[in-house]
């Protein structure tokens, strides 16, 4: 890896809703960033702002000290690894690969082995906080993988997030994000059930929320999402289909173990059925309609 004062050259794959503001944060932080996306129009504005366009993942990897991917699905990343124009054909020994997307923990472990064969350290650093935090540079970043590589890229991670936590070996970052999603899904179900109970007895849902927020039941779901229930506002927000990724990741993580997570399993299956019924684009709080139906709003 280059040891001059211009280190590192950053390559970034994936210029979607989260990727674009992360790239802008990196450029504001003074880093040189090259980009690639299947659709060049998705990075045209970034190039106009100073990013460098590349023709293929291979070209991007070959010119990068640190290569970052922020893609929606693990399969999307896997499709870019191999072949004459793939990442592995261009990635340089001694460079660092970072997967910032949310993917299954075992996928991160497989990536670490694949890149190790190229003498490349791999980190899994999923983020949380959403688009606004990405724009503000206030994401939470949970990092798993090679500790020395993590120490080297801390300045990069600090440019995009305000809370950076190293959580362990390869896959630990993704596992931590999955734990977050398990708690989030179960909390969402708890909030919808408690609001349905309050509504049956005619209580003021806004007043109930105020009380719940003052006790141990307080949570970001109650603070930020629950007002939608009282307003019956199911426009996303955070579309509920995103939880299907977590359902798949949890099943893969548990496969081959004796561990059972019965509550998480039940909640994810409940959400999955709701999505399968055509409600995936609604806000996550629309799960409430399974308990207090509002067919006009849901359809």
Image (cartoon, rainbow, N blue to C red):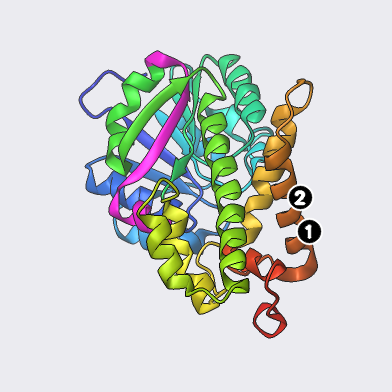
Where is 271 relative to 196, above or below?
above
Residue 273 is labelled as 1
Residue closer to the observer: 14 or 56: 14
Q: Is residue 180 left or right of residue 298?
A: left
Residue 51 can be seen in this image: no
Q: Residue at x 66, y 34 (%)?
A: 84
Q: Quadrant of residue 241?
A: bottom right
Where is 226 relative to 73, above or below?
below
Q: Tell me where the magenta segment starts and ends, as one range.
A: 130-148
Q: Secondary structure at mark 1?
A: helix
Residue closer to the observer: 94 or 74: 74
Instruction: Give the crowd class for mark 1: few <14, some 14-19, many >=20 residues within 10 Å.
Output: few
Q: Position of residue 9 (x, y in %)?
A: 34, 33
Q: Secondary structure at mark 2?
A: helix
**CB contact under 8 Å: marks 1 and 2:** yes
Residue 269 is labelled as 2
Task: Quarter of the image for the C terminus: give it.
Answer: bottom right
Q: Position of residue 147 (x, y in %)?
A: 41, 15
Q: Is residue 271 magenta?
A: no
Which residue is most to the front? Answer: 201
Q: Residue at x 45, y 49 (%)?
A: 217
Where is 215 relative to 102, above or below?
below
Q: Position of residue 298 (x, y in %)?
A: 68, 77
């Amino acid at each position: 890896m280059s040891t001059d004062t211009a280190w590192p050259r950053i390559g970034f794959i994936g210029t979607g809703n989260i990727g674009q503001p992360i790239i802008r944060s990196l450029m504001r932080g003074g880093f040189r960033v090259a980009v690639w996306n299947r659709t060049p129009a998705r990075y045209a504005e970034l190039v106009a702002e100073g990013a460098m366009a590349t023709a293929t993942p291979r070209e991007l990897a070959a010119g990068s000290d640190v290569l970052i991917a922020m893609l929606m699905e693990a399969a999307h990343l896997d499709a870019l690894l191999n072949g004459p124009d793939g990442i592995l054909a261009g990635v340089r020994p001694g460079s660092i690969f970072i997967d910032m997307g949310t993917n299954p923990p075992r996928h991160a472990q497989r990536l670490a082995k694949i890149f190790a064969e190229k003498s490349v350290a791999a980190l899994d650093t999923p983020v949380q906080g959403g688009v606004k935090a990405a724009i503000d540079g206030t994401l939470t970043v949970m990092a798993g993988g090679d500790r020395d590589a993590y120490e080297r890229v801390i300045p990069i991670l600090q440019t995009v997030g305000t809370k950076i936590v190293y959580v362990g070996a390869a896959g630990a970052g993704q596992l931590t994000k999955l734990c977050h999603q398990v708690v989030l899904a179960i909390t969402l179900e708890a909030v919808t059930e408690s609001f349905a109970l309050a509504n049956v007895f005619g209580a003021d849902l806004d007043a109930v929320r105020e009380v719940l927020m003052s006790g141990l039941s307080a949570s970001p779901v109650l603070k930020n999402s629950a007002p939608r229930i009282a307003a019956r506002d199911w426009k996303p927000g955070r579309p509920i289909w995103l939880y299907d990724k977590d359902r798949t990741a949890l099943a893969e993580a548990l496969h081959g173990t004796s561990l059972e997570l019965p509550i998480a399993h039940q909640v994810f299956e409940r959400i999955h059925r709701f999505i399968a019924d055509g409600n995936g684009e609604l806000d996550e709080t629309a799960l409430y309609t399974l308990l207090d139906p509002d067919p006009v709003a849901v359809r």
